Image (cartoon, rainbow, N blue to C red):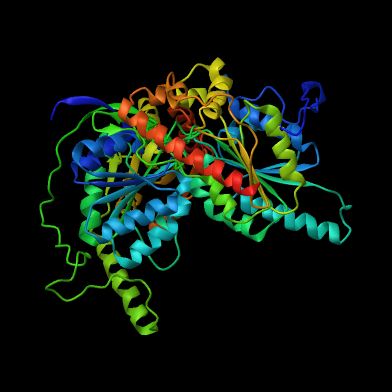
Amino acid sequence: MDRFSVFSSRLVDKSENFTSGHRACQGCAEALAVRHVMKALGRDTIVAMSTGCMEIISSPLPLTAWKVPWIHNAFENSAAVISGCEAGMKAMMRKGIIPQKKINFVAMGGDGATADIGMGPLSGALERGHDMVYICYDNEAYMNTGIQRSSSTPFGASTTTSPAGKDSMGQHTQKKNMPQIAVAHDIPYVATACPSFPFDLIEKVKKAAEMPGAAYVHILSVCPTGWRIQPQDAIKYGRLAIDSCVFPLYEVVNGEYRLTYTPYRKLPVTEYLKGQGRFRHLTDKEIQLIQDKVDRDYQKILKRCEEGR
Amino acid sequence: MDEKVLMKGTDALSEAAVQAGCRCYFGYPITPQNEIPEYMSRRMEEVGGVFLQGESEIASINMVLGAAATGARAMTSSSSPGISLKQEGLSFMAALELPAVIVNINRGGPGLGNIAPSQGDYYQATRGGGHGDYRMPVYAPASVQELYDITMQTFDVADKYRTPVMILGDGMTGQIVEPIIAHEYIRPAEDLPPKDYILDGAQGRPSRIIKSLILDVREMEEHNWKLKRKYDLMKQELPQWEEFMTDDAKMTIIAYGTAARIAKGAVKRARSQGLKVGLLRPITLWPFPDEAIISVAKKSKIFLVFEMSTGQMIDDVRLAVEGRVPCEFYGRPGGIVPAPQELARIIERYWLQKEL
């Protein structure tokens, strides 16, 4: 993003491939992320989507919010299904049954589908190197089934299966670092994004689609329902997550790290945590633990970015 | 403890499991059974048990397998698509003869289906579901009180026969709220066999082996026959059913679980119109209460099997009846829960058609 001096919203594709009228909650940043992603990908796209919020809200057949070929599959399988789509289309094009054309093969899933149950098929698809993009919409819990913890739920968050109370401080394990797991597969492109930074997100998704081979984009999607915040604050909390370096925006191109956004002033994590109902029970000591972990992780990313220069 | 309390089906099931000594629960989110892991995540902390949310259904069932191998009373729950993923674990546990309780809150299918109450998993539950030559006791409670009582009972059945046991409910039995007597766990009259197979360190005793890989075909055959003898014993000892107004019934409705609740209402309606109709409700789906079916078949002129599926239990009814009486079928698959009036109309229709 820093290589472009001017970003004008007028230059963004005006067509909507993920239309309005779907059933997402008020202030859903995940639906916004899908909208931006589909703007970036355009119409020549096949989407395989795991069960989850975005699938449920967008496809109450016969109604659908999708203007592209879209296939729904069981929770764990979107990476495997899109692998099949890609292989199938390749064969059809080779035989001349379908004309040669650049088509984006995109698998989408939530954090549960990606970091928990679908990890195996995802790893397989990345290893095989299909020409596909995997997009993880990370709202940090199983929101569709009623806010159960996932391995992407951050330390200290209260969910219905990691409830905070007298005997428990909520989620007591650290968030699984999916982008780093994707990087470890040595794929051409890995990026983190957030719909609070739409131009950055659109550019990254475009890059991911254009890069030959497998690409992985991890999108932090604020969920007002599950995070216990006001719907109008979804964009604000996305910004706070990035400005407090809880979720740094970076991309890894062929193994080289690049920070795509540097906060003007790094905020303390309390700015991000306060106001979120899922963190309201945290003590100063626990917040300090979170701050230390965020600082350590951010330093790691900075160091890797410097190495790349 | 003996006064009535208002409880939701899933809560009653979870609490009964805790009372029965279940201290290991392994779950994974899927609607409409999320209330079970949610209840357990809180309750296990209080009673010093273990609540773990696996990264998939396959992980959860295999955690149950591991816990059972250490001698713990372990449980997992899921709904139809999740139970499909658990089948590998069920087959393994049947082969390894490990006790556990598996809850299936049945929803509409096949595929992802919907989240409404359905009885489409009857075949999967009663025919094994997983691979290999095995059976598994399946209980189908029809009320919250029964859900509570049967959950306690299933842990004893699992321990007695060293087998996984399934509780087959549906969205309705799970979500319904009813007054129940949440009594304490009553130990079974006969002593449960000692857990002399568990893996807890072999110091001072010969080592034990729990395995299902048996390459020698003769040994494997013997293992299969051993399991078969166990299943035959279960067939003698386990069948449970409820009869409602069957003594003078010319027509008997056969239904289980939620469908049986509807059928009971329909039978009452038909009776008020002077039609002699009764209800036979299998509580155990495997072993199927063949004896009860046969004895009722002697009294009835026609059977009407009612299921919230396209017709699965009717096969078992026909096998038991062996042509003694004609079996008609009425089903509402896909998550529709018909009202008793609807079934009463069907009853009346058959009554007139067959000139009873």
Residue under the image location 42 percent in, 55 percent down: B316
* Above or below, B29 relative to A146: below
Left or right of B87 on screen, residue B20: left
Question: Could one spot residue B264 in this view of the protein?
Answer: no
Residue A7: x, y in percent? 76, 25
Residue under the image location 47 percent in, 34 percent down: A145
Left or right of A255 on screen, residue B231: left
Residue B200 figure quarter: bottom left
Left or right of B319 on screen, residue B240: left
Quadrant assignment for the N terminus of chain B: top left
- Give the total number of marks visible in the rendering: 0
Question: Could one spot residue B196 in this view of the protein?
Answer: yes
Residue A172: x, y in percent? 34, 39
Residue under the image location 81 percent in, 21 percent down: A10
Residue A110 figure quarter: top right
Quadrant assignment for the C terminus of chain B: top left
* In-front residue for pair B24/A248: A248
Residue B333: x, y in percent? 53, 40
Residue A249: x, y in percent? 60, 35
* Above or below, A195 relative to B123: above
* In-front residue for pair B93/A92: A92
